[in-house]
Image: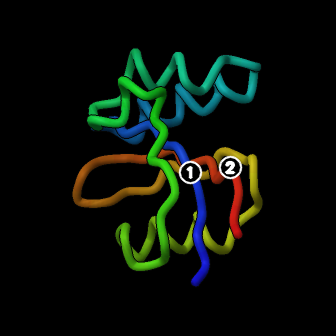
Amino acid sequence: MAKACARHILVKSKEEAEKLKKQLASGADFAQLAKKHSVCNSAKKGGDLGEFSPGTMLKAFDNIVFKKALLTVHGPLKTKFGYHLIETIYRS
């Protein structure tokens, strides 16, 4: 079964997500931004979601984690929880 490890930053607005994405593109530290801005429980771990299989997360989330480029910040992705910036660390 496929597995992946990803981290994310979850915020309430698309504008905030886009602002954070620009900071990341300018070299800001993902984990530090997650700790400061993310409203997810994973924030205290720098946004780290650990390793998971397809179907564990929402379908739209899985589509990014299991199909898009590794080590690239994708998003903002809107879900029922808010707006995510997602980075897939590895897939196996």
**What residue is shown at x 75% (from left), y 56% (from top)?**
70
Spatial CA span between label 1 and label 2 = 5 Å
**What residue is shown at x 36% (from left), y 24% (from top)?**
44
| Nearer the observer, 54 or 23 | 54
Q: Relative to 7, say whether 79 is above or below.
A: below
Which secondary structure, mark 2? Answer: strand
Residue 76: x and y in percent read: 50, 49
**What residue is shown at x 48% (from left), y 39% (from top)?**
48
> Could you say which disc has been placed on residue 73 in the image?
none
User: Dot 1: few (<14), some (14–19), or many (≥20) neighbours within 10 Å?
Assistant: many
Quadrant of the image occupied by residue 1? bottom right
The residue that disc 1 covers is 6
| Nearer the observer, 64 or 22 | 64
Q: Relative to 17, say whether 55 is above or below.
A: below
Residue 2: x and y in percent read: 61, 78
Q: Identify which amino acid the numbered label 1 is placed on.
A: Ala
The residue that disc 2 covers is 89
Quadrant of the image occupied by residue 47? top left
Q: Is residue 16 left or right of residue 33?
A: left
**What residue is shown at x 53% (from left), y 16% (from top)?**
32
Looking at this view, name the residue that lies furthest to the front. Answer: 1
Quarter the C terminus occupies:
bottom right
| Nearer the observer, 1 or 6 | 1
Q: Would you say the residues marked 1 and 2 are in contact, meaning their CB atoms lie under 8 Å apart? A: yes
Q: Identify which amino acid the numbered label 2 is placed on.
A: Ile
User: Dot 2: few (<14), some (14–19), or many (≥20) neighbours within 10 Å?
Assistant: some
